[in-house]
Image: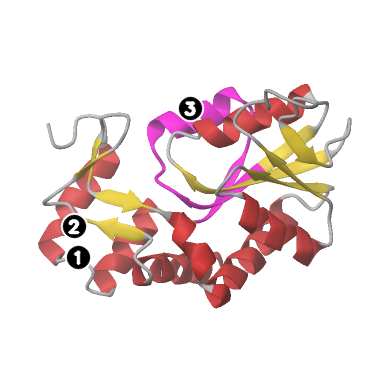
Amino acid sequence: MDKLAVANNIAGQLLKIKAVTLSPKEPFTWASGIKSPIYTDNRLTIAYPDFRQIIAHDLAALIKEHYPDVEVIGGVATAGIPHATGVANILNLPLNYVRPQKKDHGKKSQIEGRCQKGDKVVLIDDLISTGGSILKAVKAVREEGGDVIGTVAIFSYGLPESTKNFSDYDTQLFTLTDYPTMIEVAQEQAYVEENDMELLQQWYQDPESWGK
């Protein structure tokens, strides 16, 4: 798989459907309080059948390349579920999905679908900011006896906090595209002006203090 071509194509498509919005002069405020020049809603991808299939095929190729021993595909609820389903269909593998917490009724399950002791699982989410959601799912699968051999996602901001968090969980992450690629493609396709690039790059270097 041509990683650069995939990264550029995914970034371009996310911009086209407005799943990603870049606004360096009028930044967004995340729930964490961080001021950001980017807002991402990858849930929009499921509304576009052709793009949805491209994502599934590219994620499947990414998994085959990095995690060829995978036995089960897992989706992080809720945004990761449709993409995990597509990948599991392509790879003809069992599927599960992981809730943020256990149900408070019935069998009080947190994981639905297959999750057996020793299963080699790859978890899928749509977006990585700090990694909190997918790493919570990693913990849940491991507690059930599953072996999470890795994680994949459509897009990552590449924040320093997420790098540390994945390292702390001893978990690898691979994504189809990332923030540096996104802003380059945005500039090439005139989604942002050239003089916005400095602001966008500054945020990537120091997101915590940017805009203060």
Residue beneath the point at 76% across and 58% down: 88
Residue type of the residue flagged with mark 3: Lys
Proximity of marks 3 and 1: CB atoms separated by less than 8 Å: no
Cβ–Cβ under 8 Å for marks 2 and 1 = yes
Of helix, strand and loop, which one carries label 1? loop
Q: Which residues are magenta?
A: 151-176
**Which residue is the site of mark 2?**
197
Query: Is 157 one of the magenta-colored residues?
Result: yes
Residue 198 sits above or below residue 49 on the image: above
The residue type indicated by label 1 comes to Val
> Disc 3 designates what residue?
164
Residue 126 numbered tag: none
Front residue of this view, candidates 32 and 154: 32
In what quadrant of the picture does the N terminus appear?
bottom right
Amino acid at dot 2: Met
**In the displayed structure, would residue 25 be above or below residue 159?**
below
The x and y percentages for residue 25 are 11, 52
